[in-house]
Amino acid sequence: MAIMITDECINCGACEPECPNTAIYEGGVEWTWAGGTELSEVELEDGVVVDANETQEPYSDEFYYIVSGKCTECTGFHEEPQCAAVCPVDCCVPDPDYEETEEELVAKKEWMHLE
Ligand code: SF4
Ligand code: SF4
């Protein structure tokens, strides 16, 4: 499952540079599918296709946040979620709304990085 950041985040920023998929953004900062990936366009679950460079609304204005669609639990890059490993207050936790199998996470990683 994807990792999520809880409201216990102290906005230290330590997690952001650790993410191999650029799935972590500072609160209030817009995100893109293309940031840190090879994606050029993305078909969403509703069938809408978006330009991967198009900026998207922040998920949070107060705390660092994780774009669940880009989080792979670091599969293919690291043994464990790097954000959780560096977070000083342990507020990077599994997101129960985004349960994914190991195979799905591998496929997600390959989709983003074309490998
Ligand atoms: Fe990024 Fe890994 Fe944290 Fe997911 S678990 S947000 S891929 S650092
Ligand atoms: Fe927030 Fe933890 Fe990331 Fe620091 S490392 S910004 S406390 S989630």
Image (tube, rainbow, N blue to C red):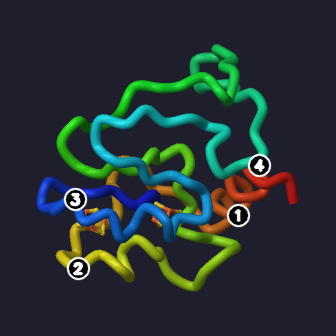
Is 107 above or below relative to 76? above
Among numbered discs 1 and 3, the one appearing first in the sequence = 3
x and y percentages locating residue 67 in the rendered image: 45, 45
Q: CA distance from mark 3 to mark 2?
A: 10 Å
Circles 2 and 4: CB distance less than 8 Å? no
Q: Nearer the viewer, residue 106 or 115?
A: 115
Neighbourhood count class around disc 4 (C-alpha, 10 Å): few under 14, some 14–19, many 20 upward: few
Is 53 above or below relative to 81? above
Is 85 above or below relative to 97? below
Establish whether ligand 2 lies closer than 8 Å to the Cβ of label 3: yes
Residue at mark 4:
111
The quarter in which the C terminus is drawn is: bottom right
Establish whether ligand 1 lies closer than 8 Å to the Cβ of label 4: no
Residue at mark 2:
88
Residue at mark 3:
11
Q: Secondary structure at mark 3?
A: loop
Residue type indicated by callout 3: Asn
Q: Nearer the viewer, mark 3 or mark 4?
A: 3
Q: CA distance from mark 3 to mark 4?
A: 30 Å
